Amino acid sequence: MSDEIRVAAGGPELAERPETRLWLTVGLPEERGRWVVAHEHHSFADTT
């Protein structure tokens, strides 16, 4: 079983201006002692 890193960050400005919110998902499994990018996805919130 591999290890994974999961991180979430933000501040009050995201609640005040949701149109600036960027969701970034990165899957970082550890393989042979190194962290590798296995998955990357980004999107902006739909504020309509």
Image (cartoon, rainbow, N blue to C red):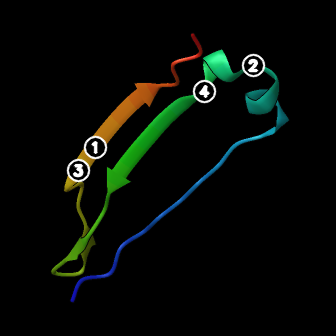
User: According to the image, label 1 marks what residue?
Assistant: 40
User: According to the image, label 4 marks what residue?
Assistant: 21
**How far apart are labels 1 and 4 at the CA level?**
17 Å
Disc 1: CA contacts within 10 A as few (<14), some (14-19) or many (>=20): few
**How far apart are labels 3 and 1 at the CA level?**
4 Å
In this rendering, the label closer to the viewer, 4 or 3: 4
| Quarter of the image that includes the N terminus | bottom left
User: According to the image, label 3 marks what residue?
Assistant: 39
**Mark 2 is on which residue type?**
Arg
Q: Secondary structure at mark 1?
A: strand
| Above-or-below relation of 33 to 15 | below
In this rendering, the label closer to the viewer, 1 or 4: 4
**How far apart are labels 4 and 3 at the CA level?**
20 Å
Disc 4: CA contacts within 10 A as few (<14), some (14-19) or many (>=20): some
Query: Residue 17's mark?
Result: 2
Q: Secondary structure at mark 2?
A: loop
